Amino acid sequence: MNKEKEEALRALKTSKGQIEGIIKMIEDGRYCIDISNQIAATSSLLRKANKLIIKQHLNGCVREAFLHDKGAEKVDEVMNLLDKIIEK
């Protein structure tokens, strides 16, 4: 496993723990702003993990595709992904 995937995995595992904590906060009737702050922190970690995975994809799969004249397919794939994750 390379550096980006290891870092993404760490961020996802941390996010998982934070989500479990958020669920408990809601169940315990904690203050809404505190819950929302935790949700925002978790969202940030998930975005970080996604960026790392996309970086890995660009440096690996997309680079390799261009070497084999299949780069246009990968560019379309990345553009479709960006359409999903970039807020409109």
Image: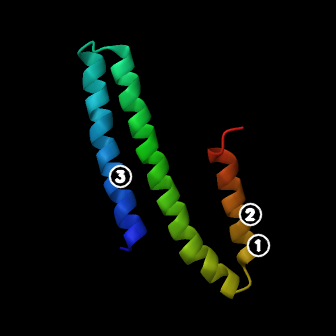
Label 2 or label 3, whichever comes before in sequence order: 3
Q: Residue at x 65, y 54 (%)?
A: 81
* 10 w.r.t. 19: above or below: below
The disc label shown at residue 11, or none: 3
In the rendered image, the vertical position of residue 13 relative to residue 58, given as above or below: above
* C-beta proximity under 8 Å, tags 3 and 1: no
Q: Tell me residue 52's x, y (percent).
A: 48, 61
Q: Decide if residue 82 is on the left or right side of residue 29.
A: right
Image quadrant where residue 68 sits:
bottom right
Residue bearing the label numbered 1: 72
Residue at screen point 50% across, 69% down: 56
- Mark 2 or 3, which is nearer the eye? 3
Mark pair 1, 2: CA separation: 6 Å
**Residue that mark 2 sits on:** 76
Marks 3 and 1, how far apart at CA: 31 Å
- Type of amino acid at the residue the image marks with label 1: Ala
As helix, strand or loop, the secondary structure at mark 3 comes to helix
* Residue 36 x %, y %: 41, 24
Q: Position of residue 37 (x, y in %)?
A: 39, 27
Instruction: Identify residue type, mark 3.
Output: Ala
Q: Above or below — where is 24 with respect to 28?
A: below
Mark 1 or mark 3, which is nearer the start of the sequence?
A: 3
